[in-house]
Amino acid sequence: MSKTPNESGSSGRIAGIDFGTVRIGIAITDPQQKIASPHDLYHRKGTDQDAQYFCNLAMSEHITLWVVGLPIHLSGSESQKSREARAFGAWLEATTGISATYYDERFTTLFADELLMEGTLSDKQRKRRRDKIAAQILLASFLESDRSMTDTALPLEDSPERDA
């Protein structure tokens, strides 16, 4: 499991990634790693351009850890999208040289949609903000959590086989 910057003694920002095959929502902490803020909505362009974008982001924002959201079923089991997010996290690590960890992103997009519905934004404006707000919710949750638990996804409800 990757260490967080505070555990390893280094300082810098943590970036939360709401992974998508077309769009990637990005949130970043302050240098003290206390506050998560929405940063960008990146539209994927191809491996080389994506690599350049994330390397530039890591350098310009002093990123020391990537937190990639894992879309996990209510039962706690991983999905095909989870495997794609893990592959993207491994690619981020290899491309930028910065460790990636994974965090349960269940309901982050739903929560982002609910927050955005409270405003007076058009559908188009909400869509442009949704993924980076979801990344912010993911990153804020990660910051509030016991970070040593990030590799374990627990179910939100008991599954029938656990009750037997």
Image (spheres, helix red, strand yellow):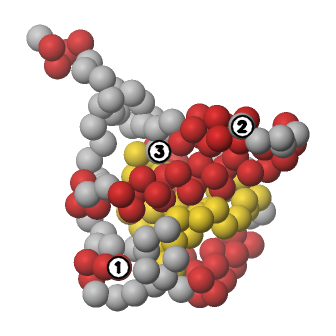
Element on which disc 2 rests: loop
- Residue 70, percent from left and from top: 45, 47
Element on which disc 1 rests: helix
Q: Amino acid at mark 1?
A: Pro
- Residue 109, percent from left and from top: 60, 40
Query: Residue 89, can we see it?
Result: no
Decide: few, some or many residues near mark 3? Use Cα within 10 Å; few <14, some 14-19, many ≥20. many
Q: Earlier in the sequence, mark 3 or mark 2?
A: 3
**Res 57 quadrant in image:** bottom right
Instruction: Report the residue marked by disc 2.
Output: 118
**Res 67 quadrant in image:** bottom left
Q: Earlier in the sequence, mark 1 or mark 3?
A: 1
Residue drawn at 85 percent across, 37 percent down:
123
Residue 130, label in figure: none
Left-right relation of 6 to 25: left
Q: Is residue 61 above or below residue 147?
A: below
Decide: few, some or many residues near mark 1? Use Cα within 10 Å; few <14, some 14-19, many ≥20. some
Left-right relation of 44 to 98: right
